[in-house]
Structures are given as C-alpha cells and as structure tokens.
Amino acid sequence: MTDSPLRIYHVSHSFDNLEVLRDLSIEVLRGEFVAIVGPSGCGKTTLLNLLSGFDRPTSGSIERKGKSRMVHQQDGLFPWQTVSENIALGLRHVKSEQERRQKVHELLCLIRLEGFENSYPHQLSGGMRQRVELARALAGSSDILLLDEPFSSLDYLTRLRMRQEVARILQEWPRTVVLVTHDIEEAAQLADRVIVLGERPAQIRYELNLAARRPRDPTHPEVVDAIHQVLTKLHFESDSGEYTIA
Amino acid sequence: MTKPGAIWSVALPLAVVGATTVIWTIIWWSGIFHESAFPAPLAVLRGFSEELRTGRLFSDIVTSLFRVTCGFGLAAAAGIPAGLWMGQKPLVRTAFLPVVNFFRNLSPLAWIPFAILWFGVGDASPIFLIFLSAFFPTVLATMAAAASVPTIYSRVAEDFGIAPSEQIVRITLPAIMPQVVTTLRVTAGICWLVVVAAEMIAGRDGLGFAVMDARNGLRTDILVVEMIVIGLVGVAIDRVLEQLTKIPSIRWGYER
C-alpha cells in the first residue's frame, strides 16, 4: 500500500442538473506536486472544494489523510488582522505565546516579509498578500496545500517571481500540493504531474509526468516540452504547423 | 484638484461663517422682520454670556448628552446583536424583517404621547424615544452587513478549525465593524435630532426644553444661542465617533 494522503475514487459531482465532474479518479502521493489544468468553468475549483471537505461529492469518495489548507485566488486574508495575526491563525494550537511568535517570525523570513508583521493586508501589494496567504497555509501542522489559482490576480512578472518563491518555499517546507490553474506554463514549471481536464463535465483528458527536479526554470527543456504536449492535446498547437481552435 | 493647505482649510470656513453673520446683520438692520422675531447678532452674543453665567446652558448640554448616551448606547447594545442574528439566520430575518422595517418607518416622535403616559416627563421618556429612533436603523444596517460578509472568510475559518459558534465573534463581527461604525455615526446623528424634539414636548430640562422655554419667554436671542449650541454639539459627537474609524482593525474598511 502506497502512502497517499489524497485519493479520489470515481468521483462525480453535480449542482442540481449541472454535471460538473464525471468519474474522476486521482491519487496524490506524499510530497507530490500535482497541477490540475483545464478551461475555466470546467470544475477545477469544485474539485478543490471537494478535496478540502468544503463540499461532498454527489457520488464516489474522497480519502484525505492529514490537514489541508487552501490558498485562495485573492482576498483570503482577514483584512482586520495584521500580517502576523493572519499567519498566527495557523498556529492556534501552539500554547506558548513565545513559541508562536518565534514561528510567525520564521514564516515571515521564509516569505521575505520581515518588517511587515504589523501591516494590514490592504497596505500590501497583491504578490505580498499571496505570500502571506501561503505562509498562513504552511503554518502549524498542515500536510496538504490546495492552491486555487493563487497567482491569477497578479501580473506576469510577479507571477514568475511567485512561482520561484513557491518552488523555493516547498524545498524548505515540503508539502503535498494540489494546484488548480488555467496557466499551463505555471503547471509545467511547478508540478511533478500535470493533469489536464476537458470541458464540463470534467474528465481526465491527459496526464503527464515531469521527471526534472524542482525548482525548474520556466524555459527548462522538459517544461517547454510539457507545455507543447498539453497545448497539442488541447488543440492549440499541431505538429503539422496547422493551428486549429478547440 | 489639489487639497487646500492647513491655513486655507481653517480660513475658508471661517470666511463663510463671517459672511453669514454679515448677511444676518444686514437682514436685521433692514427691518424686514420685526425686532421681536429676528434677534441681532450682538443680542445673541449677550444672551450667550447670560446663559453661561447662570450655568443653565452647561447643565442643559449635560442633560441632553446624558439622554442621548443612554438611548444610543442601549440601541447599539441591543441592535448590533439583533442585526447579527438576523443577518446570519435567514429564518429569523424572514420573520422579523417586516416588523423591523415597519418600526423603522414609524417616526419615533409619534411615540411621544405614549412615552409621556408610560414614563412621564423626565429622563426616561426621551431615552425611550432616542432608543426607538436608533435601534431599528442599527438592526437593519448590521443585518445587511452581516448577510453580505464574503463567504471566503468562513471557509478560511473552517480550514483553520475555528468552530462555527466562534465565527460570529471572530469573523462576522470584525468583518462588519467598518459598516457598524458608519451606522453608529449616522444613528448618533439621528439621536441628536430626536432628543431636541423629545425634550421640547416631553421634557422639563435639556436643550430641547430650553428651546421651548425661550420661545415661551419670547427670547429669540436665547433661542438662537440654543440652536447654535445644538448644532455644534452634534458636530462634536460625530467628531468623537469618527475616531473609531482610526482604530487599526477597523481602518481597512475605509482605505481600500
């Protein structure tokens, strides 16, 4: 029996009469980084809501071992709390005040926001806010990170920097990660495995493993090749040079 | 448009006040209104020093402020929890909303006869009327704010193991505080309007009673003194409550 903190068995999900997911089975290994890409509205976020336990699947089952934390697209921080108070949310089980402060400081250093502990979220840039969210999700004893298009509200260069940050942070604080994104480049650069979902109702259309060690550059040959393969599967690219729209 | 500097932001309003006083003097001088119906600025100044000397002005301010503080405080203490409850529970909202809307649209002044019958003239009647005028708007505004708190906050709370029973204090209340503070500023203004009317009819003291008393004594100079003081105290109350918007955990609601 392999060590899989997340298992999805034949999961289907519908909202009223709208079938969103159809017979999905995915197993995520410990420490693995899985990226799920697909067109917008295909049910990616629904899948994350099922993984986090926020929703229950209409049929099939989900097995989760350990605590999961979600990093949201934006505005997931509590605006009435400072950066340290937000991060300390993940450390509520730590009894000693001093130990908690020490851990908050450690996380602030990790996301390179020392000196911003007493700032409020609205005083930070979008990229800084997402880093705080990430730190909050890492704090304490979380085992699984669920990332819901965490960089989609950021500009391209900030997004590139955030990918580097995430890759670096995960080296220091390894976690099992499920990233949902529509950014194929982001998926290919960060993940060990890319799962491509089709149009609604979402089914697995394609699965791709990347062997190159993380962190990788966005133009690492294997990353570029993965992007090419995924785009081809989605009919955005063809080896014959003829371009068709899916 | 650039913001005027510190000197201008004092000088310009003062100039407007000065010009108003000049117009006032001209109207008085012209004799359009009978002397007994239109006091001269100087007479008002004399009336002001008379009121200060006897100490009545000060005690009336204290009396009215006390009543507003009580009525407003009770309304906030009862109205915010009631609004939270209605905002969180759709069933409760469905049940109470029509009644709350009805009373909100019923002028508190219509309650004056009953207030006198039940509580007599004294502190209790005005406090009751002020409470009524502030309670229902506070409930409605708190309810609307609580019902529209982004769901993402409760999802985050769930992720971090904050129990649903804790969420009302730890999530909903802080999330709506900026709107609550705005509501408090608006209702405090309503309270200050209502206390004058309540004391005019159901009072034996306070600024509202002083207005009525000046009218009965045909002292238009004193009447103007009371009017100026009522306006100034109202502005001061809002200035005090405005300080709440500067609390760090509330300020975010006004800055983004």
Image (tube, coloured by chain):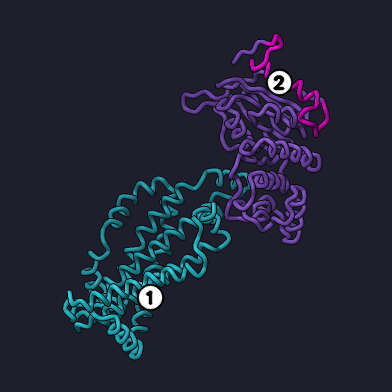
Chain colours: A purple, B cyan
User: Magenta segment range?
Assistant: A212-241
Q: Name the amino acid type tagged 2.
A: Glu
Secondary structure of residue under mark 1: helix
Q: Residue at image x 26%, y 58%?
A: B106
Q: Residues within 10 Å of mark 2 (few under 14, many from 20)?
A: few
Q: Nearer the viewer, mark 2 or mark 1?
A: 1
Q: Position of residue B136 (x, y in %)?
A: 35, 58
CA–CA distance in space, label 2 to label 1: 72 Å
Residue tagged by mark 2?
A207
Q: Residue at image x 42%, y 72%?
A: B236
State the mark number for residue B65: 1
**Depicted A168 relative to depicted B183: above or below:** above
What subunit carries mark 2? A
State the mark number for residue A55: none
Q: Residues within 10 Å of mark 1 (few under 14, many from 20)?
A: many
Q: Quadrant of residue A68?
A: top right
Is residue B11 among the parts visible in the rendering? Answer: yes
Q: Quadrant of the C terminus of chain A?
A: top right
Q: Is residue A166 left or right of residue B138?
A: right
**Depicted A42 relative to depicted B24: above or below:** above
B253 and B79: which is toward the camera: B253
Q: Quadrant of residue A45?
A: top right
Instruction: Say whether mark 1 and mark 2 are on the same chain.
Output: no
Q: Position of residue A188 (x, y in %)?
A: 73, 27
Q: Quadrant of residue B58?
A: bottom left
| Label 2–label 1 contact, CB within 8 A | no
